[in-house]
Image (tube, rainbow, N blue to C red):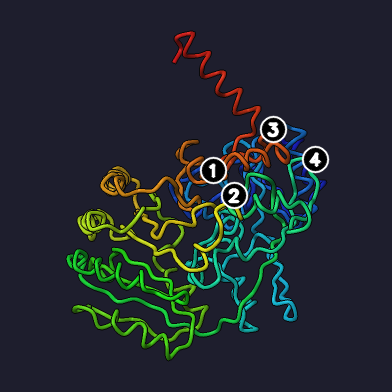
Amino acid sequence: MSQYAAEDLRKSVRGPVLCPGEDGYEAARKVPNAMIDRKPAIIARCAGAADVISCVRFAREHNILVSIRGGGHSIAGQAVCDGGLMIDLSCMKGIRVDLQQRTARAEPGLTLGEFDHETQAFGLATALGTVSKTGIAGLTLGGGFGHLSSKYGLACDNLIAADVVTADGNLLKANASENQDLFWGLRGGGGNFGIVTSFEYRLHEITTVIGGAVLYPATKAKEILPFYREFAEASPDELVIQAGSMTMNGVPVFLVGGCYCGSPAEGEKLLKPLRTFGSPIADIFAPVSYIQMQSMFDPFFPPGRQTYVKANFIKSLSDMAMDALAEFAGTSPSVHTFGPWVEHWHGAATRVAVAETAFPHRQYPYNFSVWSNWVSSSETEANIKWSRACWDAMRPFMADGSYVNYLEGEGDPLARAAYGPNYDRLVAIKNKYDPTNLFRMNHNVKPTELAATKTADAVGAVEAGTM
């Protein structure tokens, strides 16, 4: 990309436009996962929707690769591209809370913590994730599991409207009455159909919750898991509960953690059997503010560590599945690893019909993951090997689908499985709003024509003996 092209873009946007070697470029291209080291030809730090429109039109005119950065927390590093245009939305942090309607209109550069800061001033919140540094945009577009999901659904279930810049450079409103097909696709279809410049969410009354965890020695995982399963499966909608292995203060532990968002008195009563089971090392459940709850896991996910994730829904937490999980508890080669880990999905998040939103995985009760984190590149091989071994041990218990927000960039088969039975409908929406696949730095839904061309090329290569 020539310097002249960058100058043309600078003239059409309000925000900074950065090229390699310029001040601010290196910081802007960095994402939290240190395994990602890509160098865009241009980074456009958008100040508003008009800048986004200019960037999309520029990318079409110059036929260059585009990546979209919101919070930058894509595990696969899809927020940043090599040699193309990175459209950086992280400066777009406007938010307006409507107390009468109990809604919030928020721009895509906000993190969960920034969003919560504004809504909690009024005792309100929406269902977002579990780490406050995560961006709202990617989280919502991929589904959005969090501490309130069993009571109020996923983040995408609380999305009531969006402003979207599509691949033709136009700004569209998507909601239940306008561009309904696009609105459906945004709720779980990722960034495949355009760039969202504004999200509108439904809000709920939330102030204090009971949050925390009970910690046990990692060697006790096999004893704890059956109790966790029984406790989780009897949980009311007000409780989101998770279990897994990590290291705290140099000690490998197995914990059962959760967030209860109902009556404090009922919560204390409900959690008592969990807090008194076995011989825990520590019990850190307590009434906390919702903002404290949302930031509780933050210290374990600082930017700059190398991260590799394997994740998939599992059909059930069977005895054999629990044995496989317990075998790997406390055995990671890195003290920074989070997992093996199991989230319990239930309540409102699972009572939405499969076809009601693009996010399809409403029927599975547990989501398994391994978040391997380490510091030095010399540790990479050992940590990836361990993660894959844990994944292989759990493979017999896996369902036919993954949570797209937890996917590494591992190719089309996993993307198709992540979108499940809704994939063909997503292709139809892609054909309409992005037929040339401009927005492909994601877990990609390919438009029909390009997918057919790729298939034909592969067949031709086989016939020619070049594959």
User: Of the residues under marks 1 and 4, which one precedes in the sequence?
Assistant: 4
Q: Which residue is the site of mark 3?
A: 436
The image shows residue 24 at horizontal and vertical percentages of 62, 53
Which of the pair 57/433 is nearer the observer? 433
The crowding category of the residue bearing disc 3, from other C-alpha atoms within 10 Å (few below 14, some 14 to 19, many at least 20), is some
Q: Does 225 appear above or below 215?
A: above
Residue indicated by mark 2: 190
**On the picture, is 148 further left or further right than 123?**
left
Q: Which mark is residue 320?
A: none
Separation of marks 4 and 3 at Cα, in angstroms: 23 Å
Residue type highlighted by circle 2 = Gly
Local packing at callout 4 (Cα closer than 10 Å; few below 14, some 14-19, many 20+) is: few
Inter-mark Cα distance, 4 to 2: 30 Å
Q: Disc 1, disc 4: CB below 8 Å? A: no
* Mark 1 lies on residue: 443
- Type of the residue with mark 3: Thr
Marks 2/1: CA distance? 7 Å
| Residue 109 falls in image quadrant | bottom right
- Which one is earlier in the sequence, the residue at label 2 or at label 1? 2
In-image side of 269 versus 153 (left or right): left
For residue 378, say whether it is visible.
no
